[in-house]
Image: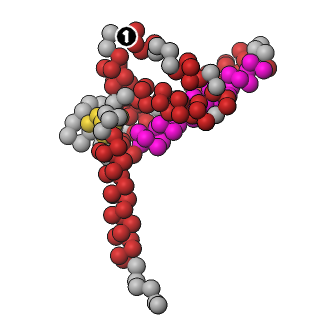
């Protein structure tokens, strides 16, 4: 959180440099590239706000965010005409497969994302643990629905009876 101003300044600098370089690129190609970047951003945004954030709030962090973003982008590409070639490219062998232990790298990157975006601890602990995609529905989604339902029930119980 302390580096927020510096990160924003860096983003502006990168955006200004990219904008200057993009002026030399053909307009049509530039529009297609902007649309694809927007699609990738939408995939990350969806993954972080709708999937990772609820887990982070419960003291868990999805351990395979890279695999999750590929899944989110694949889903978006099925619905979005701008991403027609995206699905076929996502089916290609990912660069992370070239790493000796891609799962460990993905887990470390996922923990780093949780620390950067949510402020979680640097290491696993009793109140901060990874969650696999296979167990995510049971451990996060079901739990969130039950907590929300219990909160709603408490509010409804506090309301005075309706005149009828």
Q: Position of residue 105 (x, y in %)?
A: 35, 19
Q: Which residue is mark 1?
A: 99
Can residue 9 be seen from the camera position used here?
no
Dot 1 alpha-carbon crowd within 10 angstroms: few under 14, some 14 to 19, many 20 or more: few
Q: Is residue 79 above or below residue 67?
A: below
Q: Is residue 123 above or below residue 96?
A: below
Q: Is residue 153 visible?
A: yes
The quadrant of the picture occupied by the N terminus is: top left
- Give residue 96's position: percent from left, percent from top: 42, 15
Magenta stretch in the rendered image: 28-53
Q: Residue at x 38, y 71 (%)?
A: 155
Query: In terms of image quadrants, where is residue 98?
Result: top left
Residue 36 falls inside the magenta stretch:
yes
Which residue of the protein is positioned furthest toward the bottom in this rendering? 164
In this view, the residue in front, 48 or 138, is 138
Q: Nearer the viewer, residue 120 or 35?
A: 35
* Predominant SS along the magenta part: helix
Residue shown at 40%/83% (left/top)?
160
Please name the residue shown 36% across and 48% down the image.
141
Side of 149 where 28 appears, left or right: right
Q: How is the image coloured?
A: secondary structure
Residue at point 34%, 70% (across, down) = 154
């Amino acid at each position: 959180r302390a580096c927020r101003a510096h990160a924003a300044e860096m983003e502006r600098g990168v955006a200004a440099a990219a904008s200057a370089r993009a002026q030399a690129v053909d307009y049509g190609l530039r529009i297609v590239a902007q649309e694809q970047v927007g699609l990738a951003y939408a995939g990350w945004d969806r993954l972080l706000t709708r999937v990772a954030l609820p887990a982070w709030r419960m003291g868990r962090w999805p351990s395979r965010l890279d695999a999750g973003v590929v899944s989110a982008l694949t889903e978006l590409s099925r619905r979005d005409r701008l991403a027609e070639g995206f699905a076929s490219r996502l089916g290609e062998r990912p660069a992370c497969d070239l790493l000796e232990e891609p799962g460990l790298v993905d887990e470390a990157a996922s923990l780093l994302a949780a620390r950067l975006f949510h402020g979680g601890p640097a290491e696993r602990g009793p109140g901060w643990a990874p969650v696999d995609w296979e167990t995510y529905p049971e451990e996060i989604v079901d739990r969130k629905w039950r907590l929300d339902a219990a909160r709603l029930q408490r509010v409804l119980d506090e309301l005075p009876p309706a005149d009828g």
